[in-house]
Image (cartoon, rainbow, N blue to C red):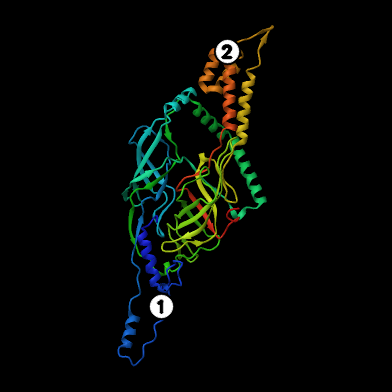
Amino acid sequence: MNNLSRNSVIGMSLFFAMALNLPAQTGHQNSPALKRRPPAQAAPKDVPGADSDLAFLQDSPPIVPPPLRLVVDAGVPLRVMLRKSVPAKKVGQSIQAFTTEPIYSFDRVVIPKDTEVDGHITELVSPSKMKRTAAYLNADFSPHRAVQVEFDTLILKDGTRMPLRTKVVPDLGPVIRLETNPQKNGAVHRARGLLSQQWHLLISQIKPSAAWQHAKQFAWSEWPYHKQRIAAGTVFDAELEQPLEFGSAAIAAEEMGAMGQLPAVNNEAYARLATPLSSATAHLGTPVSAVLTRPVFSPDRKLLLPVGTELQGMVVHAEPARRMHRNGQLHFTLQRVQLPLSTPQPVEMALEGIEVAKSSHIKLDSEGDTSVAGDKESRVLRTALSVAIATSTMRTDEDRGTIDQGGDPGKTSVAGGSGFKLIGFALGIGLQSRAFGQVMGFVGAGESVYFHFITRGNNLVLPKDTPIEVSFGQHRRPAGS
């Protein structure tokens, strides 16, 4: 169990099962040990003390459930984000982040959204010699060190500081939320939405401010050296290595009477993947597990599914990345809900949304299929430009019947830049050699063709703790189709 003590959940489940005189949902409701007790027969009036016994039972106080300990267990991730860029200078440097979503224990928030989490840089790992050499040949002298961080303090809204011990996985960078929009998945609506999205994107790209911003970003990326920074919007998943205690809370018995019942159709729930998935290793039937990160309530605010409830399913379609730059695909479904002390209950669920890193280029279609988006237009344009630069160096410059062996300095420098960026550009201007321009031009064209069309595509990877959103009572197509 996550987000609360498993023993607490088991104890509460048993208590309310007995208090409400209901059988625990174990899938063996016909077992003699779990049958309802027969109603007590009225005591005969002539039995001495019968009236006093009934009066004692009627005057006895109602059963009060024990207080529930609010605990966030070890292994639960805190998803935090940097709001400001942080220069990566040295080990021990402090960093400040904020939680991107609330953290629940059982059925209530214990860590609100936007809670401050402080930490520090623990290690700066330099790249290998091969990677450094390749960067130097491309005129890139920036550090490119892998930054490892740790978060050690949680600061609540009232100023309370709680020490943390966390294990931080490599940063995800900026993230993006993808949605299927199932309520409006008609063909006309999707076409209109796509046209509107493309139109607004085009307008935003041709604005003077956007053009100037792109120009600055391009110039900054091509500059031979720039200081390393952890960009604003970078997201980290900090897994707790020790549980966090938040006291206890009393829960009324009537609020728990519906626990274990399945939500209504179209009721949405938030969860996170408990098993990592990759199109390179997944296959039909690979088990998938997720856990609820927020409780699910009925319309009258009765608790149905507490935080930590397990959602079970499997992979129904997976294709690994292949040659000719074909990217991976993956589709999974969740089909069962399991509470403590119960067998899994079958229920239809549909994937409504997922939060992934922007750099993963993952897309989600209206059917819930995830795949890696291929930027075919950009690859074609870049390759065509590289080939055009290479072929331009083959044309000879003649003046009064003589061939200029130095070639056009402009073509030579551009070809050098195509091969080795700034260093090739500078050598092209300095050497003014037509042979050098031809070699560099075809090196750049060959690299472009290989990396854009021949090499293997990208596999689709969904790391552990990836946030997802599901809805109950919907399956857009049968599992395994």
Q: Give left or right: position of 97 versus 315.
A: left
**Residue for badge 2:** 433
Examine the image and state in which quarter residue 228 appears: top left
**In the orientation shown, which residue stands out farthest toward the right?**
401
Q: Is residue 467 above or below residue 228?
A: below
Query: Residue 426: x and y, percent?
Result: 52, 17
Query: Residue 396: x and y, percent?
Result: 66, 13
Near-viewer residue (281 or 442)? 281
**In the orientation shown, which residue stands out farthest toward the bottom?**
46
Callout 1–callout 2 Cβ contact below 8 Å: no
Of the residues shown, which amino acid type is indicated by label 1? Arg
Near-viewer residue (318 or 193)? 318
User: Residue 237: which numbered mark, if any?
Assistant: none
Examine the image and state in which quarter residue 254 appears: bottom left
Q: Earlier in the sequence, mark 1 or mark 2?
A: 1
**Residue for badge 1:** 37
Q: Give left or right: position of 189 versus 247.
A: right
Near-viewer residue (430 or 438)? 438
Residue at 50% x, 59% y is 336
Q: Is residue 302 above or below residue 464?
A: below
Dot 2, how many residues are within 10 Å of its Cα: few (below 14), some (14-19), or many (20+)?
Answer: some
Q: Give left or right: position of 10 versus 345.
A: left
Secondary structure category for the residue under label 2: loop
Query: Residue 59: x and y, percent?
Result: 33, 80
